[in-house]
Image (cartoon, coloured by chain):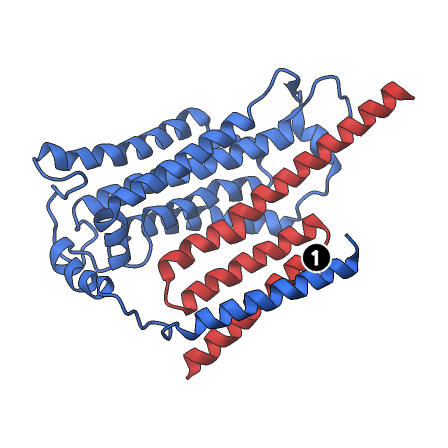
Chain colours: A blue, B red
Amino acid sequence: MSPRIRLALFVISLLGFAAIFAAGARELKPVGQYPGPYGDVLNAAAVPERHTTDVVTAINFDYRGFDTLGEEFILFGSVMGVLLLLRQTQDERRKENPEEEAGGGPQASDAMRGFTLALVGPLAVFGLYIVLHGQLTPGGGFQGGLIIATAPLMVYLSGRLEEFKAVTSPHVIEVAEAVGAGGFALAGFLGLLAGRNFLANVLPLGKTGNVFSSGTILLISVLTGIEVAAGIVLAIRAFLEHALEIELKGGKTR
Amino acid sequence: MILLIIQFSVLLLVASTALAVVLTRDPAKQTIGLSFFGLLIALMFFVFQAPDVALSQIVVGAVALPMLIMLGLAEVRRHRGERTRGKSGKSK
């Protein structure tokens, strides 16, 4: 295809898209003006019903908790897929001393090493804070879990591959991943055991505004946090290991 | 009014950064741009009053996704190097 035809095709599709987009945008309400009833209903119901001041978390872990269960298993499945794809195959082998062999690249600067190492603690604490305060302020298990997962990444970025591998020992992280994912589903069964719906709240709701309030929402948020943090760490570790420590058999290129 | 100006400038920043990422040809440089773009998208979510989404976007868009792409790129380059060297060794 010559550049000219390509440009003509691009301009035609751009004009068509612009027309449809403009027609669609004309009907849009201004930002923040939501025409449906559900937002107002949930805003009014969440605090008295579930003692949560962050309605988004109440929707994620209670009103639409079943959707979140599905989403969590999407993440679980993707992480399993990554681990399966990046496993050590028969025509590959482990490098004998990867740290020496990988010495060709530029070393991280002292400033970068110091800064990333100093970030490890604050990131872990901030992640835990976001997980535990999901029912009170924006955040929750998913966001907090992601932030926790960046803490071991900072260990690697500070130039400590061995420490990174020790911190992210698969024995521990894989168990955490399974506990988080399975625990969410089991927490749903608590409702069934109490003779109510799947994922219905059975725990004491506590006082609105306290950390230990909102019943199952906090429990599920913590379990999701464990699952997400473990899943992301497992995926990053698999990528790192494959890139740094595994090579094709016979290919003595380094 | 101030909020409107901030929202407009963030949208403008997101659009121009997206264009810059698309127009970058080198994948490694593109990934660095993508990381910055992810950070701006998080800022956009925050300015449009969606802090829950902004929190996850910061990590996914600015750290996790670029990191995985970078490691994937390193993998592709390494394999390409091993394969071409292996082939030239056999045929010549």
> Would you name the residue on which mark 1 appears?
B24
Q: Is residue A215 above or below residue A233?
A: below
Asked whether residue A254 appears in the rendered view, the answer is no
| Residue A168 as seen in the image, left or right of residue A253 | left
**Extreme top residue here?**
A90
- Of residues B76 and A24, the one nearer the viewer is A24
- Of residues A81 and B46, the one nearer the viewer is A81
Write down the chain letter for disc 1: B
- Of residues A42 and B82, the one nearer the viewer is A42
| Residue A210 as seen in the image, left or right of residue A32 | left
What secondary structure is marked by label 1? loop
Amino acid of disc 1: Thr
- The residue at the point 52 percent across, 37 percent down is A236
Residue A158: x and y in percent read 58, 43
Asked whether residue A250 appears in the rendered view, the answer is yes
The quarter holding residue B14 reads bottom right
Q: Quadrant of the N terminus of chain B?
A: bottom left
The quarter holding residue A180 reads top left
